[in-house]
Amino acid sequence: MPEARYTDAIREKLRLLPERPGVYLMKDRLGRIIYVGKAKSLKKRVASYFQPGRTRQLRHQPKIRTLIEMIADFETIEVKSEPEALLLEGKLIKQWRPKYNTDFTDDKRFLLVRINLEDEMPRFALTRFRKEDRSRYFGPFAHSGLLRRTLASMRKQFGVLLGDAFPVKLPDGRYKLYEDVRAELYGWPNEVTVADYRARVEQACDFLDGKSREWLSELKAEMRERAAKQEFEKAAELRDVVQALERTLSRTRKFTRDLTRLRPNEEALRALGEALHLPGPPVHMECFDISHISGTFVVASMVHFTDGVPDKANYRRFSIKSFIGNDDFRAMEEVVTRRYKRLLEEQKQFPDLVVIDGGRGQIAAALKAFLAIEAPPPPMIGLAKKHETIIFPDARAPLNLPLSHPSLNILQRLRDEAHRFANTYNADLRSRKIRESVLDDFPGLGDVRRVALLAHFGSIEKLRSATAEQIAEVPGFGRKFATELQAFLTGQRESPSSDETSEAAASE
């Protein structure tokens, strides 16, 4: 560290640092965050970056030396424990994607298995980087030796090609897999049709998919064991592998559906991930909206997009339970709490991006929800409708993408779908209440008999269709009263509301 950088201001900040766990953010002279780290003792750890002669000690570690030379300022966040520091560090790295965190972890990426099924003769190959292409990926796998042995065994078991093989096409359209001794060693016919070979590949993919699930169970068990032993760094490393492997398996389940309709969204999702500094394209997104009429019939919706298109099987709608009245912030906090508390209990993955319809107030309410369930929030933004401004939950300035930007178009479709779904639910409740309130206008019908009617027939529509004799069967009703009620309901008959729609969605 050049002495000029070790200013009085830095000395004072170092003097005031606590000897407690926390996370530190190193900044360059332009105020950009270039590295995020965790510490058991903030005072000792941060001070180590500013020791005189530190850069000379690192002459054989150029990346670390360059980082230290770039540091002009820092910030710290104090937490209660080392595990909390570990979780916060991971969240901030994903949020800010600092240059030097990326550099330092590149060499530690775990192996993936890649196969491009669009090739005529697909081959299984190892890679450390997942590309947003049309290939299928398996992994990541923490144990490279075991993975390489598995692939070697798979080649013999299923007769498939690995990355070191280069098949030759024969004049009759078939392929010759090997031109050396491997043709005899592996025990499979060496000249095959494309169809026969692809059948082998499908079997191998099923096998590797099963292996992935087996390894996932083993990794989870090891992660819990490490955490119990308070080996938090190793537990966190395994947690990251588990989460990445779970995402891969989730994508594998969806791999067989038609991907042609998703192609237009691929670039937009990739651009959205870059604009929001996400770890990758937000494949799974959820959006929340609150709907009410002057504080009555307060409801909320949550819609789910997969690959940029509606995934209606995962839509949810909510009635507000914790209070009565008009408070969008409290309503937002309640429904976000209920949604992700349930996902935690069911041990399901959070989405890649949560979108809140609204500005800073709604975002703050959503963050309170994650504090309440003691879970680190996934990447989250607000979308303020007036100028389509993207609001971040942290200190980043609001972002306005061009109105024609395809990434903004996806966010608008997501937000508008949440708005539509909330309004549909609201209209359904209003319509139902209006229909039920028709009974209030019939003289002499008290609460007890009104409840008895609805319990007997189930709805106003069925009651309207009933004869006087059927109404008279309800306890407390005579024939004369039933006849008068039936005539009243017949005269009040309405056509169904155009707002009444049904969708394949669950209520929470």
Image: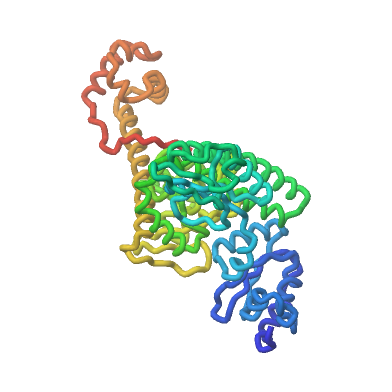
The residue under the point 28% across, 13% down is 468
Between residue 492 and residue 131, name the one nearer to us: 131
Q: Position of residue 420 (x, y in %)?
A: 34, 46
The residue under the point 32% across, 36% down is 501
Task: Tell me where residue 44 sits by quadrant.
Answer: bottom right
Q: In this view, does 470 lie above or below 324?
A: above
Q: What colouring style does the render use?
A: rainbow
Q: In this view, does 51 lie above or below 24?
A: below
Q: Position of residue 229 (x, y in %)?
A: 78, 50
Given the current orientation, which residue lies at the most extreme right position? 229
* Left or right, residue 495 beside residue 161: left
Q: Position of residue 96 (x, y in %)?
A: 55, 66
Between residue 109 and residue 432, name the one nearer to us: 109
Task: Tell how many labels.
Answer: 0
Q: Where is residue 156 in the image (x, y as percent from the top left)?
A: 60, 40
Given the current orientation, which residue lies at the most extreme bottom position? 4
